[in-house]
Image: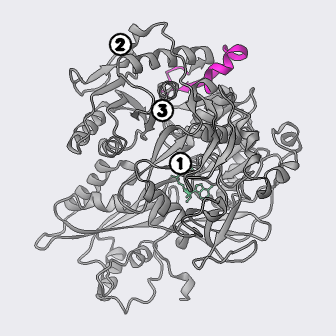
């Protein structure tokens, strides 16, 4: 077997080798109505016009005080955008739309159960509810500008209401994906030093009412153990007035928001005038070390970028019904369910449950019922919908003008099904490549201007100038035929400002590799390292292969292998643990877990189950290992380093390459044998 067939541990190295694909063109009808068709955009946003080009983006917002300086680089690489400006995100997402659109739907909330009707929250109602809740946060919880609050809530209208109430007060929100465990929530409470946790008693998922309050209890308990006391837990009720959890309300700590709100009827709170560079929120994401990174996003730059890309790339017009089926607990939901669409005064759909409940036609019924014409989801969801109901979309009367795919590479065959069956052969598609850190799109086609290429995200978004370096720092240009490390040459307003409480880690992780001079305050010396491998085709389009580090992208979201490994080690019987990505037909990649046991302990399916359960408990079901392989020993180098590369090859049923230099080459054959027999 040739060298290139050997798989390694990183996703980029496991990537499939797709051939070049044919181009698809946006329809005449789409182009005729598109928000961006003016070809001078390339000239306006070229590197020579950086950073002033981003004034166009800032001008989509309403400022209390207009900014003076576009970009301040004096604290490189912590860039400050729109310096001197003052604004409020909640004002931009709500108040400024009232005069003309108070009666318009801001949020369509679709409960998972079919027998529950969709709720339509108008801009006026959103304003009332955000004001009343902001008053509660201020008076009852004592929160003020700069404080951090952890929000562990499912998909519901109350989640953006909570976020916007925080934004109104200048309180920094940190939303944790509801599927994460109480322990994972506690880690984020501790890191952000939140003393208030906002949660919900229960929510529906796959037809079952999940008890979510239990996670709040666990989170408080673990956080306390780490030295961070939560003073107040504010609980929204899934059914207002009816508590739906089995967990006890703890006196003096737990409060029902729905009950408290009665005292805040009619209260209004003036939005805080926030400096453009003051933080709006934290969003935690996995990195190569165990601890998740709190990505700190600023107010002015982030909101300008989310708003502009929603307008020009999502092509949202005021009359559109826009549905992004991501979860608000991830960055996609922050930028493209909440902040971007609401800042534009659009109607945004929030769906509580899973896309395939109760059947594979659910999404298309929602689209038909609400008249959704812009649809946004991940390859994982597309693969699942295609597998379960390839013929379903044709049965419903809906028509998308525009569709998005985000979060992981999409296979051309899956892209084509999406285009043909879901898009009914006429919707334009954008494959948007970006990250939690980047706040908004990095690479994408401009929907009304560029042809689409299945499997490729396209060129840099306006004002984003990617560059691919090899490990030696040489540039790999268009048509180089080789993949390298994709970086962004210039700062952009949506980029996160730092890692909460860890500037050194921020500088080292994202700029350490290709920085030309650590003393420099010239942005040209600070290319941003995405951590992905990509290559650029002759036509300039980028194709992202996956992560170059040991982070696994599961269903479009990053999980740190170290986090999973340390969760496994929490089981008393486990001596060593190694996690590798294995290709999965629906989820892209899933973690495969190898463990070896402490001396004297006999392997058993119970131990494997216990480890799997611990991983789910510590991190959440999203991290559930595909298999737990109990091995006699790990393949190791002579210096004792676990060779994850070898394990990844076995998990992906590929050649392991040369293992003769290992300390214990025999173990490789033994583990392979185990795989063949399926004996875990
Ligand atoms: C990682 C970021 C983007 C918000 C949701 C995930 C991968 C993302 C694409 C795409 C190929 C993609 C990258 C990136 N990724 N979008 N269109 N094509 N790969 O945010 O959890 O921060 O993950 O997802 O590997 O680095 P995230």
- What residue do we see at 27% from left, 28% from top? 231
Residue 173 can be seen, yes or no: yes
Q: For residue 19, which quarter of the picture?
A: bottom right
Q: Which residue is mark 2?
A: 259
**First of labels 2, 1 by sequence position:** 2
Q: Secondary structure at mark 2?
A: helix
Quadrant of the image containing the C terminus: bottom left
3 and 1 marks in contact (CB < 8 Å): no
Q: For residue 398, which quarter of the picture?
A: top right
Counting the numbered discs, the total is: 3
Q: Which residue is mark 3?
A: 155
- What residue do we see at 64% from left, 60% from top? 522
Residue 664 or residue 434, whichever sits in front:
434
| Picture layout, residue 34 above or below residue 245 | below
2 and 3 marks in contact (CB < 8 Å): no
Residue most extreme to the left: 600
Q: Residue 329: x, y in percent? A: 47, 40
Q: Which residue is mark 1?
A: 497
Q: Secondary structure at mark 3?
A: loop
**Structural distance between the alpha carbons of marks 2 and 3:** 21 Å
Q: Residue 399: x, y in percent? A: 74, 36
Disc 1 crowd rating (10 Å Cα; few below 14, some 14-19, many 20+) is many
- What residue do we see at 55% from left, 69% from top? 12
| Picture layout, residue 366 above or below residue 671 | above
| Picture layout, residue 199 above or below residue 639 | above
Q: Quadrant of ligand 1?
A: bottom right
Region rendered in magenta: 93-118
Q: Residue 369: x, y in percent? A: 65, 26
**Structural distance between the alpha carbons of marks 2 and 1:** 37 Å
**Structural distance between the alpha carbons of marks 3 and 1:** 27 Å
């Amino acid at each position: 077997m040739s060298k290139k067939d050997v798989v390694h541990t990183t996703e980029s190295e496991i990537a499939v080798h797709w051939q070049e694909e044919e181009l698809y063109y946006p329809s005449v009808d789409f182009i005729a109505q598109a928000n961006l068709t003016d070809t001078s955009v390339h000239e306006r946003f070229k590197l020579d016009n950086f950073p002033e080009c981003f004034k166009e983006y800032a001008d989509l917002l309403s400022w209390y005080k207009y900014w003076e300086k576009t970009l301040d680089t004096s604290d490189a690489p912590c860039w400050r955008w729109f310096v001197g400006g003052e604004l409020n995100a909640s004002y931009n997402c709500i108040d400024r739309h009232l005069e003309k659109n108070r009666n318009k739907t801001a949020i369509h909330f679709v409960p998972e159960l079919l027998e529950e009707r969709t709720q339509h929250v108008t801009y006026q109602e959103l304003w009332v509810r955000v004001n009343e809740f902001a008053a509660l946060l201020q008076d009852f919880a004592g929160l003020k500008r700069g404080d951090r609050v952890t929000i562990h809530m499912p998909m519901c209208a109350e989640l953006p209401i909570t976020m916007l109430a925080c934004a109104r007060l200048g309180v920094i929100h940190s939303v944790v994906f509801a599927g994460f465990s109480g322990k994972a929530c506690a880690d984020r409470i501790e890191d952000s030093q939140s003393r208030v946790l906002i949660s919900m008693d229960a929510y529906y998922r796959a037809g079952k009412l999940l008890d979510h309050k239990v996670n709040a209890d666990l989170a408080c308990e673990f956080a306390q153990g780490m030295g961070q006391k939560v003073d107040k837990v504010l609980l929204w009720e899934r059914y207002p007035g009816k508590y739906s959890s089995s967990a006890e309300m703890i006196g003096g700590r737990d409060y029902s928001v729905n009950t408290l709100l009665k005292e805040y009827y009619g209260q209004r709170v003036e939005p805080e005038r926030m400096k453009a560079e003051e933080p709006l929120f934290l969003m935690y994401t996995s990195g190569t070390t165990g601890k998740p990174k709190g990505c700190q996003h600023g107010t002015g730059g982030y909101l300008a970028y989310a708003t502009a890309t929603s307008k020009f790339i999502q092509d949202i017009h005021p009359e559109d019904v826009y549905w992004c089926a991501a979860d608000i607990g991830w960055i996609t939901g922050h930028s493209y369910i909440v902040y971007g669409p609401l800042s534009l005064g659009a109607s945004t759909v929030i769906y509580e449950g899973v896309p395939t409940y109760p059947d594979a036609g659910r999404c298309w019924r929602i689209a038909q019922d609400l008249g959704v014409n812009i649809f946004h989801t991940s390859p994982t969801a597309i693969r699942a919908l295609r597998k379960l109901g390839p013929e379903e979309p044709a049965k419903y009367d809906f028509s998308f003008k525009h569709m998005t795919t985000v979060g992981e590479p999409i296979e051309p065959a899956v892209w084509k099904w999406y285009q043909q069956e879901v898009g009914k052969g006429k919707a334009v598609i954008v494959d948007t490549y970006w990250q939690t850190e980047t706040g908004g799109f990095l690479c994408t086609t401009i929907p009304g201007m560029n042809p689409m290429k299945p499997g490729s995200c396209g060129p840099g978004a306006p004002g984003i100038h990617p560059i691919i370096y090899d490990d030696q720092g040489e540039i790999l240009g268009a048509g180089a035929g080789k993949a390298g490390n994709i970086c962004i040459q210039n700062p952009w307003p949506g980029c996160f400002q730092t890692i909460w409480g860890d500037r050194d880690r921020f500088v080292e992780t994202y700029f350490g590799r290709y920085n030309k001079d650590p003393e420099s305050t010239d942005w040209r010396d600070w290319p941003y390292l995405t951590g992905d491998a990509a290559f650029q085709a002759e036509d300039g389009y980028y194709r992202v292969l996956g992560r170059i580090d040991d982070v696994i992208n599961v269903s479009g979201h990053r999980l740190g292998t170290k986090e999973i490994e340390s969760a496994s080690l929490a089981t008393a019987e486990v001596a060593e643990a190694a996690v590798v990505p294995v290709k999965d037909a629906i989820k892209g990649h899933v973690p495969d877990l190898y463990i070896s046991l402490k001396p004297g302990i006999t392997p058993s399916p119970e131990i494997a189950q216990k480890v799997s359960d611990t991983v789910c408990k510590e991190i959440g079901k999203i991290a559930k290992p595909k298999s737990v392989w109990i091995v006699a020993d790990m393949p190791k180098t002579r210096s004792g380093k676990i060779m994850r590369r070898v394990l990844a090859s076995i998990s992906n049923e590929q050649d392991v390459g040369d293992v003769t230099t290992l300390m214990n080459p025999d173990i490789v054959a033994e583990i392979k044998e185990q795989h063949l027999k399926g004996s875990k």
